[in-house]
Amino acid sequence: AQKITQTQPGMFVQEKEAVTLDCTYDTSDPSYGLFWYKQPSSGEMIFLIYQGSYDQQNATEGRYSLNFQKARKSANLVISASQLGDSAMYFCAMRENTGNQFYFGTGTSLTVIP
Amino acid sequence: NAGVTQTPKFRILKIGQSMTLQCTQDMNHNYMYWYRQDPGMGLKLIYYSVGAGITDKGEVPNGYNVSRSTTEDFPLRLELAAPSQTSVYFCASSYGTGAIEQYFGPGTRLTVT
C-alpha cells in the first residue's frame, strides 16, 4: 500500500483565492510526522510546514496551514491568498518515528492564474 | 554556511559506465539521505545514513552504493549505469529524528544513454 497518496495531479487556482491540496497517509505507527514541500520549476525542494501526530492544533506557517484529520489519516495543505509565485509542484511526505525513512507522495502541480 | 551541496549538476553517462555523485553538508547533521526523482513522480529513497560509518537501504537501493566516512560527506556510487537510472538525484540532511525537516541539495540531473 502507498504510504502517501496525493490524488490531484494538477490544480488551478485564481490569484488571491485559497486552495487545498489533498494528502492521505497510511501508517500503523502511533508517532509520525507529516511534511509539505514545494518544488518550483527550478527544481529545488523547499520545506513549507510540519505536523506531528501528537500535535493538538493544526500547524500554520504564514499563508500555509495544514488541515490535520488524524482519524481520516489526512493532512491537507491549505494555501491562502494564492500568489503567482505559488505555482509549483507540492509534495506531501511522512516520517514514521520508528524508522528513519521519509515517504513522499507523487505530488500535485499547482498553477495560479492571474 | 552553504547547506547541502551536490556535484555535478548535470551528467551524461553511457550504459555500463560508473560514477560517483558527491554530497556534502556543513550543518553538522547526523542524518543524510539520497533520493531519486523520476519525471513527474515523487522522491524515492535510495539509501540513508544516521551517522558516520552507518548506512542503510531505502526503497530503491539496487544499482547503487554509498559510504559515510565523515559526518559531512555522503557520496552515492553508480556501478554499471543503466537507462533506468536516468533521473534527478537529491541529497538531503537532517539534524535528527522526529519533528525535523530535511534540507535538500540542488539536485544532480543524470542521463544514461
Image: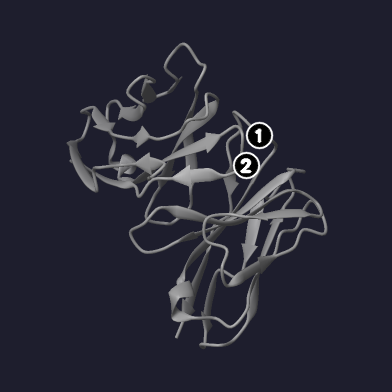
- What residue is shown with label 2? A100
* Labels 1 & 2 near each other (Cβ < 8 A): yes
In the depicted view, which residue is nearer to us: A97 or B99? A97
| Relative image position of residue B37 (x, y in whole percent) | 45, 60
Quarter of the figure with the C terminus of chain B:
bottom left
The residue that appears at 45% across and 33% down in the rendered structure is A27
| Relative image position of residue B87 (x, y in whole percent) | 45, 68
Above or below for A16 versus B52: above
| Relative image position of residue A94 (x, y in whole percent) | 48, 37
A72 relative position to A94: left or right: left
The residue that appears at 41% across and 43% down in the rendered structure is A38
Identify the amino acid type marked 1: Thr
Residue at the far top: name it.
A56
Above or below for B112 versus B109: below
- What residue is shown with label 1? B97
Q: Chain of mark 1?
A: B
